[in-house]
Image: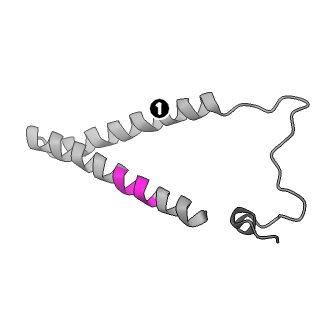
Amino acid sequence: MLALINSSRQIGSALGVTSLMAVATAVTSSHSVPGEGHRAALAVAGGLAAVAFVVSAAFVGTRRAGEPSLTLPAGRRDLRRCAAGTPS
């Protein structure tokens, strides 16, 4: 399970860098000002980070009184072993 999460992060990072480089290349090819493409890519990255913050803030709720907290079952302290389904 952890390998799947790690692979997803790596693929997502690669797609993000590729997308930002595409923005930088497109802006640089249409403008003659050096660094304008990187500035545009940075603005796009900042906008995406702001949207991600708003979405995560909207979906992360606070725990109300009386609701159970998310804890590991007794005897499952090692997260890797817990994710793999093997007892600790």
Residue pictured at 70% horizontal, 62% vertical:
83
- Number of marks drawn: 1
Q: Is residue 76 visible?
A: yes
Residue pictured at 40% horizontal, 33% vertical:
47
- Name the element at disc 1: helix
Residue under numbered circle 1: 51
Image coordinates of residue 19 in percent, x first then y, are: 29, 47
* Highlighted magenta segment, given as a residue range: 10-15
Type of secondary structure dominating the magenta stretch: helix
Image coordinates of residue 82 in percent, x first then y, are: 75, 64
Residue pictured at 76% horizontal, 70% vertical:
86
Quadrant in which the C terminus appears = bottom right
Image coordinates of residue 44 in percent, x first then y, are: 33, 37
Residue pictured at 36% horizontal, 49% vertical:
16
Image coordinates of residue 48 in percent, x first then y, are: 41, 36
74 relative position to 54: left or right: right
**Magenta stretch containing residue 13, yes or no?**
yes
